Structure formats: C-alpha cells, structure tokens
Amino acid sequence: MIRPFSANAVTIVHGLAVFAIAIAQAMTRRFDPERHHRKSIRLGGYDYASPGAYFVTIVTQDRACLFGEISRGRMQLNAAGMAAQTMWAAIPVHFPRVRLDALVVMPNHVHGIILIAGTDAATDDADGSVPDDAAELVRATHASPRRSPQWSPPQSPPHHPHGPPRRSIGAIIGSYKSAVSRHINQLRRPRSGLVWQRNYYERIIRDYPSLQRVRKYIYANPRNWKGRG
C-alpha cells in the first residue's frame, strides 16, 4: 500500500524545486555565451606571419573619437591622430620585412594595409628590402591555403606563451597599439582609460582586384563618414 505524502513532505519538495529553479536561473544569468565563449576572429590554422597583404582595422575603446574630426569630407587629425599616423609609418623600422600600403586614420579607428614579404631571395630586393610591387605579395597570399567546409584545426596547435608569433600580423598590431597608447597617455593629464579595443580586425587580401577595392574603400572613408559607427 502506497502511503500519501504528508503536508510537510510536499512543502519540502516544493521548496527544493523552487530553490533548484532559482539556482538554474542565476547560473543562466551569469553565463553569457557571447561574453564567456568568444570565438577567435582569426582564420584558424593560418600563418599570419606568411607573405601577403592584410587589410587591418583597429578601433578605439568604446569607439571614442580620439584622433580628430571629419570636416567637409576630410580628416582633420589632432595630436593623438598625428601620433597614430606617425607610429604607423614607423612600423617598418621595427619590422623590416613589412611594407605599408594605403592608410587612413579616422576619428575612432584606423584602416590600413600591411604587406609582409617572404624570406627568400625571389621575394626580397637585392638590398634585402621589401619589394615595391604589392601585386607580388598579393599573389603570395593567394597561394596560401583557404579554409574549406571540411577544414579543421590541427590537433595540437602551436603554443605561444608570450603572445602572437614574432613578425606576425598580431605582433605588428600589438606593437603599434602599444606605441600609440604610450604616446597618447603622455598627452593625457591625468591618464584616462584605455585607448584601443582589446582586439583588431583583419582580412587577407588574396588577389590584386581585391587589393584595389580595399585601397579605394580606405581612401573614401572620410567622405563616407557617418559618425561613431
């Protein structure tokens, strides 16, 4: 014979159920898939130190307009904007196999094309400098493997305990961001927060028509400016 639950037992079971639901709701609120499980915006398995052309965008923290303003379709750089432009021009001093292409410093972001040369004699000029023909480097990138629907990352990806690989796009951008931040923080009295967003955006330019389109987009950016977006 099955005995019915007492009133006290029913109350305890109900209380436990309510408690379990409250715990589940709290855990759901704390776990934000977008915030706690961010996917890398890099192309997994791709060697970002390999020869080629890369379209890079770096955005200020909170999209703050730190670098100047747009007036009549032209960018008017302030002191921070001049620092961002000057430090970009100095990248090849620190990364000798880098050549710079189109660049625009906007009020709250920077668009630029970075060209990385190879290490073989066929890629370098006689004096060891980066070749002048950007099309050669675009072809080098075009020959790099693309990700297919069946692509999967290596089982044991290389471990870089001290940040991105040397001479890679990540290392170049990290060095640039640090240099600009140091200079701007010297201008700020007192220092007032971060200069850049944590990450950056890049796109591999795989052919010469794409290179031309990106150049056109960069140079037209001030005319197309619509505010803080």
Image (cartoon, rainbow, N blue to C red):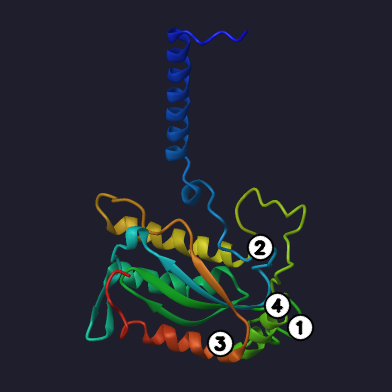
Marks 1 and 2 sit apart, C-alpha to C-alpha, by: 29 Å
User: Which one is nearer the viewer's eye here, 12 or 41?
Assistant: 12
Q: Nearer the viewer, mark 4 or mark 1?
A: 4
Q: Indicate left or right for 209 with 119 as reference.
A: left
Task: Categorize mark 3 by other alpha carbons within 10 Å: few (<14), some (14-19), many (20+).
Answer: few
Q: Earlier in the sequence, mark 3 or mark 1?
A: 1
Kindly state the secondary structure of the residue where label 3 is placed: helix
Mark 2 = which residue? 44
Q: Is residue 226 above or below residue 166?
A: below
Instruction: Choose top left, top right, bottom left or bottom right for residue 8.
Output: top left
Cα distance in 3D space between marks 2 and 4: 21 Å
Residue beneath disc 1: 121
Label 4: few (<14), some (14–19) or many (≥20) C-alpha neighbours in 10 Å: some
Residue at 30%, 62% (x, y): give it: 64
Element marked by disc 2: loop
Write the residue at 37% across / 62% down: 60
Q: Quadrant of the C terminus?
A: bottom left
Name the mark nearer the viewer: 1 or 2: 2
Res 118 label: 4
- Mark 2: amino acid: Gly
Depth check, front residue: 17 or 206? 17
**Residue occupied by mark 3:** 210
Q: Is residue 196 left or right of residue 144?
A: left
In the picture, which quadrant includes the N terminus? top right
The residue lying at 77 percent from left, 54 percent from top is 155
Amino acid type at mark 4: Gly
The amino acid type of the residue labelled 1 equals Ala
Q: Are marks 2 and 3 in contact (CB under 8 Å)?
A: no
